[in-house]
Image (tube, helix red, strand yellow):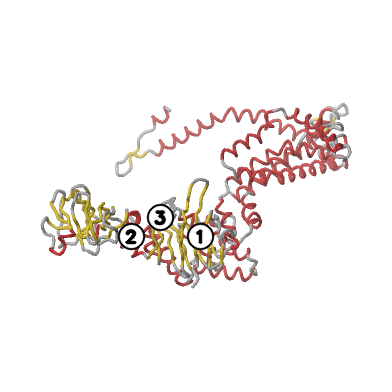
Amino acid sequence: MTAVQEQPKQLDETGDVVTPLLELANEKNKRRRGLLLALPAYIYIVLFFALPLIIVVVYSFATRTRTGGTDLSGWNIEAYEKLGEPIVRDILFRSLWLALITTVICLVVAYPFAYFLATRSPTVRNIMLVFVMIPFWSNFLVRNYAWRVLLGNDGPVSQLTEALGLGQTTILFTPTAVVLGLVYGFLPFMILPLYASIERLDWSLIEAGRDLGASGFQTFRKVTLPLSMPGIIAGCILVFVPSLGAYVTPEILGGAKTTLLGSYIVTQFLTARNWPVGASVSTVLMIVMLVAALTYFRSGGKNL
Amino acid sequence: MTAAVEIRGVTKRFDDVVAVDSVDLEIADGEFFALLGPSGCGKTTTLRMIAGLEFPTEGSIRIFGEEVGTLPPNKRPVNTVFQNYALFPHMSVLDNVSFGLRMKKVDKTDARAKSMKMIDLVQLGGMEGRKPSQLSGGQQQRVALARALVNEPKVLLLDEPLGALDLKLRQEMQTELKSLQRELGVSFVFVTHDQEEAMAMSDRIAVMHDGQLLQVGSPEEIYERPTNRFVADFIGQTNLIDATVEDDDHIILTNGTRLRAPSPHEPGTSVAMSLRPEAISIGPRGSVPDEHSATSLEGAVASVTYLGHAVDYSVKIGWIDLEVRGGATAGGQRFEAGDEVSVWWDRTSDWVVAD
């Protein structure tokens, strides 16, 4: 503040006071204040996010010692070469596949719902949005165990199918159960961005489509769908990314044959004590997510 | 000849609100027709019912004789220019314009050629590759026009199409729209709340208020011979003086003054006399020409507003203020506030309207 007052006044040819230095000083001050406000968050992110991230990447190029420790001297890409092994490759593809199916199911289920939501009166919308959020009020782990009870061999679902003469339901500990759990867990992340982008739509564009001779479906395909694309991409990424790295749901609802990346990483770190491999899988996963996020930002920039 | 649009007994209710109240209307082929009224009068709802974007609660709408009551918009031979243009933001100008043709499965090269021709017609040649967001308001307006007209609608519906443009551009577009309509010979049904715009452009005007159709007629009819108080007041500026009909040829003002004013109403009916400010002459007290003695009043100038081409006087005549527009020519006499004056008017320029 004192620096501002010390700036000498300057006069231009006409004798008017000009204060470019004052403005500059003010500008600098503002920036400094902004930085100060952001500092706690910066420190937090660097210390607990960026730094560990760097450690993971560094470890992925290290060597596992015989005793299960990590040797930080001989740098190599052996851990990445291991990703090419059939076991790891299968896990990778399975994870991608299940995440993809989860995303598609979420999209197909959420879009009509979000559309319906966006066309209701504000009161109805808010009430329904609360319903969408309610699951978040209880613990994710607890909800996953609830699914285990539901899908169990003598659980309610099985009892129902038996009563209907369709026999026992035995989907627990299968990929189907995992996808069911993932869709259940991540559906709100699809609904919310979809709702946000559909709600923002200019409805007169849809009327214009109809007016210009397009049927309801044609209007949807040519107008509504392209204009809600930012929401679709956001929702898909918000579902795909956590599905790919999901740990809890596959652990609880999946069996031994449905090991996914999340579980594999945990095994590498804790059981196999092969930190470089765990780190390399984590790194690859992060790159996939980063690419997905970049895709979103790029498309978002184009459409908005 | 079949009317381009024929509306019979159409009522539209939204829940409890009656937006359009048993309207009857006929719009001829090739006519430039304006639906005029203040916001909320039902003019846009009427237009949207012709477009098929709303369906009437009661009544019948025919387009060239064909009942379209509940046909969806894509099955009607009409196209709309929307209030805020409603251009598809994700499509280029060309894609916007050719949208309708592509929906009709017109051959791709044909659709392109037709669209380009229409883009040229609205003077946007060379801009077909741009996105709507890269165009000015006036250019967007032209795209919206081209996009509707390329489908060769039998009736073009325009919902306050010039509302978002600034004054100068609006006047330009008024002229252009009118000449375009002449050229194409298609009926234009035009919604506006701007009475000057309606007067300048239309062959006929329908004045609406509170969901009801008050009067339909040429701009001259509407301006010179309004049928009721609202129309007289809404179209241009006017002085409305409350009165009672005495006989065929005389009315009595509320203070007892007897004036000559022919009216078709029964003796004893309360009416209002509409006097346009520019139809009133002003002169020093006692200077009323003999032939106007039965159509004159005396008062004092309350305020003067100089407008350049004219001078507006507010003349206090006992219980009312009369707006008078005087010429500002060099030779004309000018008055100051407080001057005692007489005002008079031609026997043909007053007009008695029902209350």
Give the residue type that dot 1 points to. Answer: Val
Residue at image point 40% right, 67% down: B203
Residue type indicated by callout 2: Pro
Residue B141: x and y in percent read 48, 60
Which mark, by number, is residue B37? Answer: 3
- Give the mark nearest the N terminus, 1 or 3: 3
Q: How many marks?
A: 3
Q: Chain of mark 1?
A: B
Choose mark 1 or mark 3, whichever is in front: 3
Label 2: chain letter: B
Q: Nearer the N terminus, badge 3 or badge 2?
A: 3
**Mark with earlier residue (1, 2):** 1
**Residue A117 appears in which quarter of the rendering?**
top right
Report the side of A54 relative to B288 (left or right): right
Q: Position of residue B166 (x, y in %)?
A: 40, 56
Q: Is residue B16 left or right of residue B214?
A: right
Residues marked 3 and 2 touching at CB (< 8 Å): no
Residue B77 location (% of width, % of height): 56, 65
Q: Is residue A262 above or below residue B100?
A: above
The disc at residue B226 is: 2
**Vertical position of residue B352 compared to residue A141: above or below:** below
Q: Quadrant of the N terminus of chain A?
A: top left
Tell me, yes or no, whether dots 1 and 2 are on the same chain: yes
Q: Which residue is mark 1?
A: B81
